[in-house]
Amino acid sequence: MHNGTTITQFIIEEQRHIAGATGDFTSLLNDIVTACKVISNYVNHGALVGALGSAGSENIQGETQKKLDVISNDVFIKSNEWAGHLAAMASEEMDEIYPIPAGKPRGKYLLTFDPLDGSSNIDVNLSVGTIFSILRCAGGGHNPTERDFLQAGTQQVAAGYAIYGPSTMMVLTTGNGVNGFTLDQNIGEFILTHPMMQIPADAREFAINASNMRFWEPPVRRYVQECLDGKEGPRGEDFNMRWIASMVAEVHRILTRGGVFMYPMDDKMKAKDLGGKLRLLYEANPMSFIVEQAGGGSITGTERIMELQPQSLHQRVPVILGSRNEVERILAYHREG
Ligand code: AHM
Ligand code: MG
């Protein structure tokens, strides 16, 4: 039925333009794609395969793990530990880094991932996703440590997400634009359906968990209030609002039709000494890479996320990303204080 470009073909053709590419990276991406297909299958079958509900455990951030968080984490490890491309992996769902075990070959790349982002949505059958980022490991990857993972987002070699929605899609950047692929369930292949995705610079839609409004800092309050004031307010236009509580779904919407997503710093998080809600290495950096490659912006409020020097594996940061002109406006509001 299809006669399009498969994701494998796309990656191989892209790597042909890179001098010295050994095929390692192409093969690593293929293993990630396979992992996402397996997770997609579990998510699709949900209750039929007993995959819904709580796993009865907590991750390092004290969040209750869902069965599918644990299953997806295992799938990612199994799919990516055998081939010899990676030195180590780090996951939102694992306390420590996972060096490739002795007895298996080690490679020069590092992989970070959130195996099932937005998993609070899984039991109610809403969109969830997998987010990943690839880094190079210093020293050839022989003896990887946590410190090797603490690289600024600007150092990422590739980043992507799979979204398990009405259709399963994979969205990918290797620093050369952003491309979207849709899984054809009949042939088991991701097909290029959204070449060179671009976020419109202007938008009239924002996404934020408004139940936290009383904790927000003044610049975010100001931005949201001006949106809510609509035509009669300083922006002179009506805005729309969405909140799915699934970052992958929000970013996918923004890549498709523009808008702003905010999980900003607030007084509640400050009181708990948390740097933010979302994780820098598993969520904020990969999504920032994708958004910037699609022409958008991504900041903490005051700084570009991709330039942050990570301090720890599970570090959290505030995230404001999306349509460039809106993100710049929010940055200006933060700078004005
Ligand atoms: P998770 O990785 O544990 O699923 O948490 C991250 C998710 C994001 O996808 C989403 O943007 C956010 O948490 C929603 O948070 P809230 O429930 O506070 O609205
Ligand atoms: Mg997550």
Image: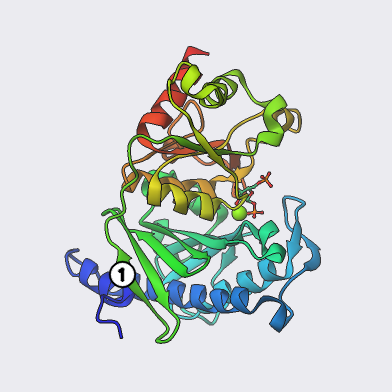
Left-right relation of 59 to 147: right
Q: Quadrant of residue 90?
A: bottom right
At x 46%, y 66%, the residue is: 142
Please name the colour scheme applied to the rendered image. Answer: rainbow
Q: Nearer the viewer, residue 223 or 112?
A: 223
Dot 1 corresponds to which residue?
192
Q: Residue placed farthest to the top in the image? A: 336
- Residue 136: percent from the left, percent from the top? 39, 58
- Residue 17: percent from the left, percent from the top? 16, 65
Q: Quadrant of residue 181?
A: bottom left
Vertical position of residue 179 compared to residue 182: above or below:
above
Is residue 80 visible to the viewer in this orientation of the structure?
no
Tag count: 1
Q: Quadrant of residue 55?
A: bottom right
Kind of residue at badge 1:
Leu
Q: Nearer the viewer, residue 288 or 315?
A: 288
Quick one: SS at disc 1? strand
Q: Residue placed farthest to the right in the image? A: 56
At x 70%, y 82%, the residue is: 48
- Residue 22: percent from the left, percent from the top? 26, 73
